[in-house]
Image (tube, rainbow, N blue to C red):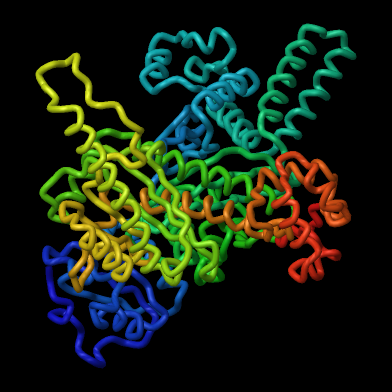
Amino acid sequence: MADPASYRPKPGEIPTDPGVYRFRDEHGRIIYVGKAKNLRSRLNSYFANPATLLPKTYAMVHHAASVQWTIVGSELEALQLEFTWIKEFEPRYNLAFRDDKTYPYLAVSMSEKYPRVQVMRGERRKGTKYFGPYTAGAIRETMDTLLRVFPVRSCSTGVLRRAERSGRPCLLGYIDKCAAPCVGRVSPEEHKALAQDFCDFMGGEAKRFISTLEKKMAEAAAEMDYEQAARLRDDVIALRKVFERNAVVLTEDTNADIFAVEQDDLEAAVQVFHVRGGRIRGQRGWVVEKVEDASDAELWEHLMQQVYGAEESQQDAIPRQILVPELPSNHEDLAQWLGELRHGKVSIKVPQRGEKAALMDTVQANARQAMMLHKSRRAGDLTTRSLALQELQEALELPMPLLRIECYDISHVQGTNVVASMVVVEDGLAKKSEYRKFAITGEAAIDDTASMYDVITRRFRNYLSEKEERSRAVQASGSIDLAAPEQDAPEGPKPKFAYPPNLVVVDGGVPQVNAASKALADLGIEDVAVVGLAKRLEEVWVPGSDFPVILPRSSEGLYLLQRIRDEAHRFAITFHRAKRGKAMTASVLDQVPGLGAAKQKSLLAHFGSLKKVRAATLEELSGAKGVGQVLAQAIYDVVHGDDAAGAEAAPAVNMTTGEILD
C-alpha cells in the first residue's frame, strides 16, 4: 500500500476552481472519480491525518499512487464530466448501482426498415424505444394482446429474410398478428406508422386509440357491417385490458419516477416506481454496496447520474418529475443536466403530503422488503456463511473455528430500565432458542461498561456452575462407558446455558470490549475470544490493541458481524420497551409488602376498584380470596397511610398515556 504523503501535491499546486479529480493506483488504473466546487479544499481533506479518515477513505488513499485533476467552468460541467468518467472507467471506490434482477422491457426498433416489437433485457440500443420494465409474464401477455390491434413485425431477422425470399409470410402473418411487410401486404411507410401507433399507445395515449376504435365500431354497426363491428369490438376489449392492467395512482397527466431507499452501514436497497399517465408502468430495484463515503444527498445524486445518464434514449426514459425522499446534493444543476438530456424541463422534488407522499410510502415498503430479502438470501446461503466464518477466524487470528458466536447489547433510556440481550449464532445461523434477556439493577446499572461486565459475569458464572453440577452428577453416578450406546448420561435439569461460545461480540468500542474481557478473566476463562463492533465506523476492536481490525466493506465476515449486532440490538430494544411499559404503570397497591401481581388482580376483581378497596374494613379485606389477617392489615395501612396521600386523585395511572386504570 502506498503512503499518501508520497504523492500528495505540493502546497499551492491545487487550484481553487471547480473541477473533477481522479485517483489512480500504481498501474495507472482510475480507482476513484469525484467532483468539487473547490478542488484545493476537497483534495486536502484526503491527505489529512490518517487516524481521522474513515476506513473507506483510508483504504482508497492508501490504494492510490497518484492524483490528477481537471478544471472546468462550472459545477454543472463538473457534474457532466464526473458522470462521463465514472461511466467510462467504472472506478472501484465509486458507488455502483446494479439491478437486483434483470428486468425485461418492451422494445420497438424504430431505426430498422421494418420496426420490430420484442422483449429485451440488458443494455439499451440506439434508435430503439423502450417501455417498462415489466415482470416477465405481464410483458409477454401485453405484447401478445397488442399485436392483435397493432400487427407490428415481431419475428427475427432470419425469419424475415426467409419470408422475403419465399414470398410467403410466417405463421403470425397468417393469423393476423403481423401486417406481413415482408411480402408486401403493407408498405414500409405504413408499417412504420403502425409501429409508431404502437409506441404512442404504450406512451400513454391509450384513450385516443380506444375512442377512435369505438367510433369506427359504431359506424360499422350503423352500416350493418356487423362482422367488422365485432372485430373492432374485440380490439377495443383488448386495448382496454392492457390499459386497465395498471392501477391508476395519480392524476392522468402525471409522469414521474418515485424513489425510496432502505439502507444500513454497508448496503443500500433502492426501489423506483415508474408512473406514466398516472399509472404504474414498471418497477426497478438496486442493491448497492456502500464503498464510497457518501451522505444520503450524495447517494441520490450518484443514483440520478447512473440511472438516467446511462440511458441511450434519455428523452423517453427521463420523466418530468423525479420524487425522492431527500434532495440530491447540487440538485439544481442536476435537474438542469437531466433537462438537457430530456430536451424538456425536469423537476426533482420531495413529496410532503397527499397521493405522491402516500405512494412513496409504498415504494419505501418495497425497498425495505428488498433489503430484507437480500439479507436473508445472504444469511441462508451455506457457501456465504462458511466464507463469513472463515474470514472472521482469519482476520481475528483465532485458532478454533467459530462454531458458536454470542453477541451482547445494552439498552436503556438515560440509565433507567437497564436491560441486556444475548443472541446466539451457530454455524452462521441464528439459534433463537438460546437467546437470553438480562435485567440489570443496582451498581451494575451505572453505565454501559459496568452493565456489560455484569452481564458477561452472570452468563459465564451460570455456565461454570452448571458445568460443575454436571461434573458432580457424573461422579455420583460412576464412570460412563462411552463404548456402550445403551448407557445414557445422568439425567438432570436442562441447563439454562449451552456450551460456551468461541467468540463473544459486544456492541461498542474499547470500553465495552475491556469490560467483557475483564469479566472473563476474573472468572478464569481464557479460551473465549472477545471483540467489539463499533457502529459508527464498523470497526472491530480486540482487547489490548490500540488499533481496530478493519474488515473490507465487501467482507462476508463483516456482514455476519453486523447482522448479529443488529439482531442483539433488536432483541434488547424489545425487552427494554416491555420493561419500561410495565414500569410506567403505577399503583398504590405496589407498595404493599407481600401483595404480588396475581393477588392485586384478585383483590381488584373482588372489590371492583381501588376506591372500594380503600373503603373496605379489615374484616372485608380479609374476606377476599388469598388475603389473610396479616396481609389485610398491611393493605389497610398502605391505602390509608401517608404513602397514599394524593392517591385519591390518581390511584392507578398509566404514566405513558395518563389513563386512570382503576
Please, is residue 393 above or below residue 150 in the view?
A: below
Residue 63 spot, x, y in % from top left: 18, 66
Q: Residue 125: in sight, yes or no? A: no
Residue 600 spot, x, y in % from top left: 71, 48
Q: Quadrant of the N terminus?
A: bottom left
Task: Decide which of 528, 215 is in the foreground and name it.
Answer: 528
Q: Quadrant of residue 580?
A: bottom right
Query: Image point 57% across, 58% down: which residue?
Result: 343
Please, is residue 458 above or below residue 116 in the view?
A: below
Task: Decide which of 616, 311 is in the foreground and name it.
Answer: 616
Residue 79 spot, x, y in % from top left: 43, 69
Q: Residue 240: in sight, yes or no? A: yes
Task: Decide which of 29, 541 is in the foreground and name it.
Answer: 541
Query: Image point 51% across, 54% down: which residue?
Result: 573
Please, is residue 167 above or below residue 126 in the view?
A: above
Query: Image point 46% across, 35% down: which residue?
Result: 103
How many numbered dots are placed on residues in this image?
Answer: 0
Please, is residue 494 above or below residue 531 in the view?
A: above
Q: Quadrant of residue 324?
A: bottom right
Query: Image point 47% across, 56% down: which residue?
Result: 439
* Residue 157 as seen in the image, left or right of residue 243: left
* Residue 347 as seen in the image, left or right of residue 379: right
Q: Residue furthest bottom?
A: 12
Residue 116 spot, x, y in % from top left: 48, 28
